[in-house]
Amino acid sequence: MKVTITFDRLRWEEKALSDAAESAGIEASLVDVKGLVFEIPKKRAEFGDVVLQRCISHYRSSLLTQTLEGAGVKVVNSFAVAETCSNKLATSIALANAKVPTPRTFLALTSEAAEEAAEKLGFPLVMKPFTGSWGRMVTVVRDRSTLQSLIEFKEELANPQEQHMYYLQEFIRRPPRDIRAIVAGDSIVACVHRIAPKGEWRTNVARGAVSKSFKPDSELKEIILKAAEAVGGGILGVDAMEPDAGYLVHEVNNTVEFKGAQSAVDVDIPAQLVKYVAQSARR
Ligand SMILES: Nc1ncnc2c1ncn2[C@@H]1O[C@H](COP(=O)(O)OP(=O)(O)O)[C@@H](O)[C@H]1O
Ligand SMILES: [Mg+2]
């Protein structure tokens, strides 16, 4: 069994995954993709039985996965899953269609339509970029005049592709924490609360949140696994919130970071993930 772990920036996670593979007796090579050149669609034996895609850049990751799959290489996660998870709108659609509880969400295609969607949602609401992570540019909008200013900024400064497009979501009243579950196939490898630091409403570890282990109840377990399945399955980070009643899944992450979660749990996360990757190569 040979696993290739592709990366564009070597983080703690990629090293941990490579070490876990070696400990499991799996040959693993870490490959910096930035120097690679591909002729389409030449078969590439050097990638071994399976590639674990760990590039941070969404676009680079997506192009590389597409190319490898086109050359017959098995990639975790698949191109289809990566496409769904790297676009928050596509994720929301997949979750809603699978009847996974998720916050009420609107797409608006002009600034006027964004104001109309805000009317329906009420304030505060949450505005998000369609692609992105680490909580970047995820904004809580508390009133109409702030929304109008944000629209002005977005029209002037946004990535041209997203210039007139808006992803708006109901603001969920919740404790200052959310839930992060690391999923591999049909098992929940780890589940933690992410507790936001003082003065920050977002609960991303990249924004200073601290992880704390907890045992999910059966309702939450079911929702987490259903969310993972809804986007096509693989190695995923399912994010959920706890309003007063029930749970809501707001995001499913494709190239999931797990350093924060690992600091809070005893289970060896990279070992479990590598086990899943090896199993998917055999399927
Ligand atoms: N609808 C919402 N209501 C309340 N908080 C939210 C909502 N959506 C996101 N958040 C907070 O913002 C954080 C980042 O949002 P998320 O959609 O996960 O984007 P990112 O990909 O940047 O992590 C979440 O972890 C959560 O703490
Ligand atoms: Mg998130």
Image: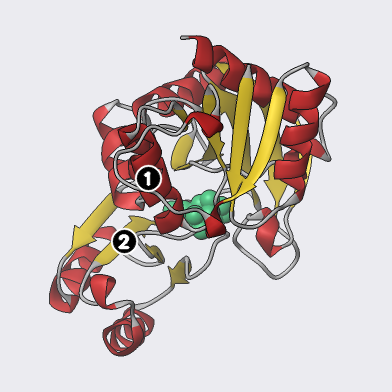
Q: Decide if ligand 1 comes within 8 Å of the CB at mark 1.
A: yes
Which residue corresponds to the image point at 37% horizontal and 45% vertical from the top-left? 103
Q: Quadrant of the N terminus?
A: top right
| Kind of residue indicated by mark 1 | Pro
10 Å neighbourhood of mark 2: few (<14), some, or many (≥20)? Answer: many
Q: Which numbered disc covers residue 152?
A: none
Which residue corresponds to the image point at 29% horizontal and 35% vertical from the top-left? 94
In-front residue for pair 247/137 = 137
| SS for callout 1 | loop
Residue carrying label 1: 103
Q: Decide if ligand 1 comes within 8 Å of the CB at mark 2.
A: no
Colour basis: secondary structure
Q: Position of residue 40 (x, y in %)?
A: 29, 44
How far is the residue under mark 1 from the one under mark 2? 10 Å
In-front residue for pair 117/131 = 131
| Kind of residue indicated by mark 2 | Leu
| Relative height, residue 38 to residue 80 (above, below) | below
| Relative height, residue 50 to residue 152 (above, below) | above
* For marks 1 and 2 on the same chain, the one whose residue lies earlier in the sequence: 1
Q: Position of residue 28 (x, y in %)?
A: 69, 30
Residue carrying label 2: 168
Q: Position of residue 105 (x, y in %)?
A: 29, 51
Q: Can residue 171 be seen in the rendering of this structure?
A: no
| Relative height, residue 59 to residue 70 (above, below) | below
Q: Is residue 118 left or right of residue 272?
A: left
| Relative height, residue 43 to residue 132 (above, below) | above
Which residue corresponds to the image point at 24% horizontal and 55% vertical from the top-left? 106
In-front residue for pair 259/244 = 259
